[in-house]
Structure formats: structure tokens, C-alpha cells
């Protein structure tokens, strides 16, 4: 669907591989195993995009033939912050890209009646404020959990926050971008709307249940 949001802060990753994998992710007949693998692969592709501006520095390397000046990440530290539980499905993919990243966890559940987020767990790396934080959660529905997670990170002093979701609703994107004027948001799909139970349409159902095979 058309993207009405600021392209400097909101990126829909329209890469063919992403869209191809997403089509299987949405399919109700995709197995738990394949769903989990797809979430992991999409996290890698999305993480690649979300880290494209990490700073580099020159380093001298000796190739088997001669000295060469190469580029390496300039000590910029990364943390992955999954929102429990579905966000856990995206952690390994990000760690494959950035193995030195630390992992913090934010536990949130949605009240089934009000759909309001409630925090039940929060454990962040001790130096989280100096890290680029990639907050991961496959589904951005109302935006309640993600805005709450962003608030914890801001309160902890984090400056660089990037949120990575797989499917987003327009309502959720608006809520997150309005809540925090600095956060950058990446997603693989901007869907049509939320239904009365705050599920994304067309969406893919409950991401946590599909990753873990619960229902
Ligand atoms: N969380 C999900 O897992 N799916 C939705 O559609 C909305 C929130």
C-alpha cells in the first residue's frame, strides 16, 4: 500500500527476496519450522538494511600479496532488543550479522480486552546507552509494545534506536513515529489496517504462536 510516512524515518524493504519470503510467511499452511526459518532470514535481510550507515574506519591489512587499506566497523557497538516473545525469533538473524552485539530483553504482554501493553520483564546491557539498539518485534500492530520499549530505552539513555518489524499496520507506524521523533523504523510490509482485536490485516496471524507452534 502507498506509504504516507517520512522516508527518512520509515523504510519498507521492498527487495524481491524479502517480498518472496514474506509471501510464504503469510501463508496459513506454512509449517512452524518453515515459519521460524523465514523469520530468521527476514531478520538478516532487514538487519542488513538497518545497519547500512554504521560508521567505518580505515585499517591496514596484509593480504598474501601486499598491504591494503580496508574498512572496518569503527567500534560502534550494537544491542539487539527483542520484545518477548515473538521478537526472539529475529535475534539469531541479527546476531549472524553482528556477532558481537549484546542482547537485552523486554517482556510485554497485551491485555486481551484493552490491548494495552504491560511490561513484565526488562533486562538491558549495562552499557546500553552507548549502543545502537535494534529493537525487534515481527508485528507492529497498535504500537503499544514498541512505544513502551522505546520509552524504556530512552529512559536508560539510549540515543540511537532503530525498530525492525516484519509486518506493520498504518496505525502502529503512526503511533511509533509520533511517539518518538528520532526513532527509525524498518519493516517488510505496510499492511492495510487493524481488525477489532488489534490483529493486522491481511497480516499473518499471531507471530508468536506461529514461531513457537503454540495455539
Ligand atoms: N501480534 C501478532 O502476532 N499479530 C498481529 O496481527 C498483531 C499483533
Image (cartoon, rainbow, N blue to C red):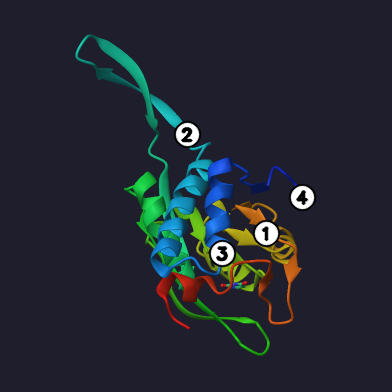
Inspect this view and state whether residue 159 appears.
no
Kindly report the distance in space between the C-alpha atoms of the residues bearing marks 2 and 3. 38 Å
Residue named by callout 1: 180
As helix, strand or loop, the secondary structure at mark 3 comes to: loop
The earlier-in-sequence mark between 4 and 1 is 4
Image coords of residue 45 (percent x, y) = 49, 45
Q: Quadrant of ligand 1?
A: bottom right
**Is residue 7 positioned above or below 72 on the image?**
below
Residue named by callout 3: 27
In this view, the residue farthest toward the bottom is 113
Image coords of residue 86 (percent x, y) = 48, 70
Evaluate if marks 4 and 3 touch, with contact meaning CB atoms under 8 Å apart. no
Mark 4 Cα shell of 10 Å, populated few (<14), some (14-19), many (≥20): few
| Residue 3 tag number | 4
Which is in the foreground here, disc 4 or disc 1? 4
Kindly report the distance in space between the C-alpha atoms of the residues bearing marks 4 and 1. 19 Å
Question: Which residue is nearer to you in this view: 121 or 190?
Answer: 190
Kindly report the distance in space between the C-alpha atoms of the residues bearing marks 2 and 4. 28 Å
Kindly report the distance in space between the C-alpha atoms of the residues bearing marks 1 and 3. 33 Å
Residue at the spot 55% in from the left edge and 74% down from the top edge? 206
Residue at the spot 36% in from the left edge and 21% down from the top edge? 70
| Residue 205 tag number | none
> Total label count?
4
Amino acid at each position: 500500500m502507498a506509504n504516507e510516512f517520512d522516508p527518512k524515518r520509515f523504510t519498507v524493504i521492498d527487495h524481491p527476496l524479502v517480498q518472496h519470503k514474506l509471501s510464504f510467511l503469510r501463508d496459513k499452511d506454512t509449517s512452524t519450522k518453515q515459519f521460524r526459518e523465514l523469520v530468521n532470514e527476514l531478520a538478516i535481510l532487514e538487519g542488513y538494511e538497518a545497519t547500512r550507515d554504521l560508521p567505518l574506519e580505515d585499517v591496514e591489512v596484509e593480504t598474501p600479496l601486499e598491504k591494503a587499506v580496508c574498512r572496518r566497523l569503527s567500534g560502534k557497538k550494537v544491542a539487539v532488543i527483542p520484545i518477548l516473545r515473538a521478537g526472539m525469533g529475529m535475534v539469531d538473524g541479527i546476531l549472524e550479522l553482528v556477532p558481537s552485539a549484546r542482547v537485552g530483553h523486554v517482556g510485554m504482554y497485551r491485555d486481551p480486552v484493552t490491548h494495552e501493553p504491560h511490561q513484565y520483564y526488562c533486562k538491558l546491557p549495562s552499557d546500553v546507552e552507548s549502543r545502537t539498539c535494534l529493537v525487534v518485534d515481527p508485528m507492529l500492530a497498535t504500537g503499544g509494545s514498541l512505544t513502551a520499549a522505546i520509552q524504556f530505552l530512552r529512559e536508560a539513555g539510549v540515543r540511537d534506536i532503530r525498530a525492525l518489524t516484519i509486518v506493520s499496520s498504518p496505525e502502529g507506524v503512526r503511533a511509533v513515529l509520533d511517539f518518538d521523533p528520532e526513532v527509525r523504523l524498518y519493516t517488510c510490509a505496510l499492511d492495510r489496517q487493524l481488525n477489532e482485536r488489534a490483529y493486522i490485516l491481511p497480516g499473518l496471524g499471531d507471530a508468536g504462536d506461529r514461531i513457537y507452534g503454540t495455539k
